Amino acid sequence: MKSIKSVTKEDVLQKLLLKMLIYSIVVLLLALQNISGFRIRKSDVGDDCRESYQFMGYGARREFLKAHNEKRALLARGEVKIGDTPLPAAANMRFMAYDCGLQEEANKLATRCEKPLEPPHFNETRANFFTIKYHGGYGGVKVAKPAVAQWWNQSSQWRSPPEITEADNSAIPFFLIAQAEADKVGCSVSICREYSYYAVACVYGKDVKVGTELYQQGIPACSKCTGDYKCDEELCKERKK
């Protein structure tokens, strides 16, 4: 009996140590995620935004902002390709901050649950729209990354970079994220058709025009930031006033 009792104590101790180890690993991974991912400060996320929207609390706004700026930083480093052809690095890519007013506009689009039937047109839209199957709560946090990735992947529709022509309207979702001087975004998420799917909308502070320059080419990143901006993780970030 003593032998059995001794083994049981050892088993309990081993299980306890294993749980402690797993907990430590989880904490470490979360810490590494925070320092290795794109750095987003609380002041970037929009402290004054309405918290009444079901899926657009601080965490969701942060995820949307992080997803946008991670893509923009890739372009600043020259790490974006269209097919096998790399796009030139961007020397004046700005950091995109969250805007509560644009979130209000995005919420009106998302709550309609109506995906546009036609491709977007230049000079007529500042919004991206996306739908994804409903998969439980925390929608704003979970859908930010796939939504931004879907829009960003429309870069494949850009026919003859660096020129933007009328024929490139299918690439507008990419252009809205990638244009260097667009430094404001607001997003919203809504549940549609009796919990069937999420509607996701993001509205940007600047539309895309035919014949304009998406960004200024050059290396290193931030080499063409203007005087009111400083370099922060390959992006030109507006100085605090």
Image: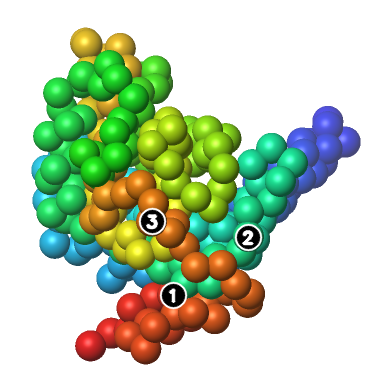
Q: For residue 205, say whether it is visible.
A: yes
Reading the image, the residue beneath label 3 is: 212
Q: Nearer the viewer, residue 26 or 147?
A: 147
Please identify, in this view, whether the residue under mark 3 or under mark 2 is nearer the observer: 3
Above-or-below relation of 1 to 225: above
Q: Which mark is residue 88?
A: 2
Mark 1 surroundings: few (<14), some (14-19) or many (≥20) residues within 10 A: many
Residue drawn 66% across the image and 46% down it: 81
Residue type indicated by callout 1:
Cys
Q: Which mark is residue 236?
A: 1
In x, y percent, where is residue 195? Answer: 26, 15
Residue type indicated by callout 3:
Thr
In x, y percent, where is residue 122? Answer: 29, 40
Q: Quadrant of the C terminus?
A: bottom left
Q: Secondary structure at mark 2?
A: loop
Q: Are marks 2 and 1 in contact (CB under 8 Å)?
A: no
In x, y percent, where is residue 92? Answer: 47, 72
Quarter of the view holding residue 117: top left
Mark 3 surroundings: few (<14), some (14-19) or many (≥20) residues within 10 A: few
Q: Nearer the viewer, residue 154 or 22?
A: 154
Mark toward the start of the polypeptide (1 vs 3): 3
Q: Secondary structure at mark 1?
A: strand
